[in-house]
Image: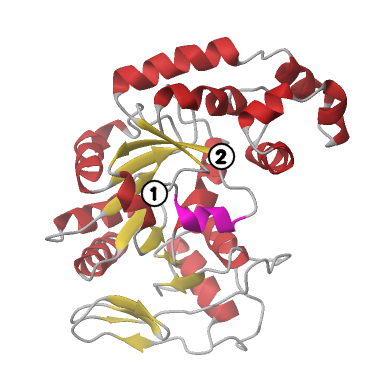
Amino acid sequence: MELDASLGWLSLSMTPGLGSRLTGKLLRQFGSPEGIFRASLTELEACHLPSAPARAIQSRQAHKDAEEELARVRKLGCLLLNWDEPEYPRRLLEIYDPPPLLYVRGDPSALNRHSISMVGTRRPTPYGNQVAERLGRDLAERGLTIISGMARGIDSSAHQGACRASHGGTVGVLGTGVDVIYPKENRKLFAEVEKRGALISEFPLGSHPAPENFPVRNRVVAGMALGVVVVQGAQYSGSLITARLGMEFGREVYGIPGNITADVSFAPNQLIKQGAKRGVAYGSACGVVSGRGIYTRGTRLPICRCTFAPGEKGLRSAGCGRDGACG
């Protein structure tokens, strides 16, 4: 998008009290950021908008902040993509609260390639790291872009595996601004992911890793991909949140079985227990996601496969709850 044309979208995204869901509602009602800022206070409140953000929109309170943010974006050289841009991830538009604006460093064409998300704990076992890296590499070799969250542990291993594929592509979805490297030890990996694909975020430049950012980030990780692979994760890990979101969005969800005595095996084993009728798929010579599971070169990886219809929600746990009736 032309940066000058981004000012309205930036103003909207930086208006206090407006999350992605309320912003989406306003955009559907008024058609564009300009239409929203031209609306009267009565029209805004008729959309059941709380008083504070309605008055902030009326006063264009965020306009100056947006101008300063635009100058920082120009200096950094990153891109801004809104819903109307052809490069905006099409699959994200299928979820109920897509981010209206994305900051992008790298190649925006990477955002609409066939992709698979890989998620897991920040404290994996050697087995978990090995599986994540090998699966990331093999799937990338077969043309799938690997999406993950650039965190320590499984995320980093998945990105590294994709980068080690000869023509592998990968996208890092950040819970910070795209100018903030977190964790610090991933500086080289950030550069490699930007070169091999893209780094994206919905958070303004300079945003630091606040804990509340990561569940928000997880819906983008789940929504952009054809499916979500949970490699390792504890009982209350973000991996299960991402898996649940993937189910709600109608994505394929997979679990990599692990040692039943290890805490980090809880998440994938729970997915298998609650959702898998066919729990094992055997790899042969290629690495693709098919209707029967994930196949990796020369490796046997047992996979749980649960498919949910778009919009199917209200699940009480991360598993499908179908007692083996899926498949």
Span of residues in magenta: 89-95
Kindly identify the amino acid type of the residue bearing the numbered disc 2: Pro
| Disc 1 packing (10 Å; few <14; some 14–19; many ≥20) | some
Q: CA distance from mark 1 to mark 2?
A: 29 Å
Does the image show residue 16?
yes
Does the image show residue 153?
no
In the rendered view, would you say 168 is above or below 174? below
Instruction: Indicate which disc residue 100 carries.
Output: 2
The secondary structure that dominates the magenta segment is: helix
Q: Secondary structure at mark 2?
A: loop
* Coordinates of residue 310 in the picture (x, y in percent): 62, 69
* Foreground: disc 1 or disc 2: 2
Residue placed under numbered mark 1 in the picture = 122
| Quarter of the rendering containing residue 29 | top right
In the rendered view, would you say 165 is above or below 258? above
Kindly identify the amino acid type of the residue bearing the numbered disc 1: Arg
In the rendered view, would you say 95 is above or below 193? below
Q: Quadrant of the N terminus?
A: top left
Q: Nearer the viewer, residue 125 or 245?
A: 245
Q: Is residue 104 left or right of residue 218?
A: left
